[in-house]
Image (cartoon, grey):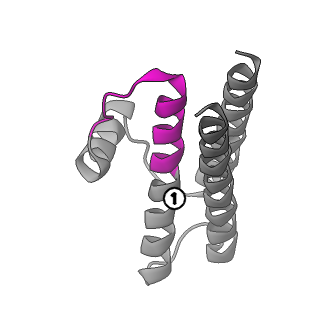
Amino acid sequence: DEEVEKLLAEAAAESADHRERLEALIDDLDADTVEYGEINALVDAQYGPPEDTDGVLYDQLANEETAYKFYDDLITAVEASDTEFAVDRDRLLETLSEIREEEKEGVEEVTQIMEHRA
């Protein structure tokens, strides 16, 4: 389906952009890297493993919602923290907030496509 293919292509491009923006922040931090497996285990512990879903759109919706919630929780934690970061706090929060908003828009876009198909 052309509409779904377009959605997934846009989601992949957005994810690549988010990755680059986060990498730019991380490059400015004096931090040790964490293995993917450890990060995945932490995400699963916080948000649970991905649920079985029917169809690509449900999977994409779950991914968008999980990403939104992750960034929302991360922003809340940064705002509540007194920790000083090696990167400017305002820049960090601005970048995370922009990404969270894009994830929110992704949720809305997938939902609209699903409602249109119903």
**Residue 17 spot, x, y in % from top left:** 72, 40
- Picture quadrant where residue 111 is located: top right
Specify the quadrant that holds the C terminus: top right
Please rate how many residues cluster around mark 1, counting C-alpha atoms within 10 Å: few if below 14, some from 14 to 19, many from 20: some
Residue 105 seen anywhere in this rendered image of the structure? yes
- Measured as percent of width and height from the top left, residue 31 is found at 47, 53
Q: Which residue is found at the position 43% from the left and 65% from the top? A: 73
| 39 up-or-down from 24: above or below | above
Q: Main secondary structure of the magenta part?
A: helix
Query: Foreground: 14 or 84?
Result: 14
Choose top left, top right, bottom left or bottom right for residue 93.
Answer: bottom right
Rendered location of residue 27, percent (x, y): 63, 49
User: Relative to residue 66, is residue 117 depicted above or below?
Assistant: above
Which residue lies under the disc numbered 1?
A: 71
Q: Is residue 23 visible?
A: no
Tell me where the magenta segment starts and ends, as one range: 49-67
* Residue 47 versus residue 1 in the image, above or below: below
Magenta segment includes 68: no
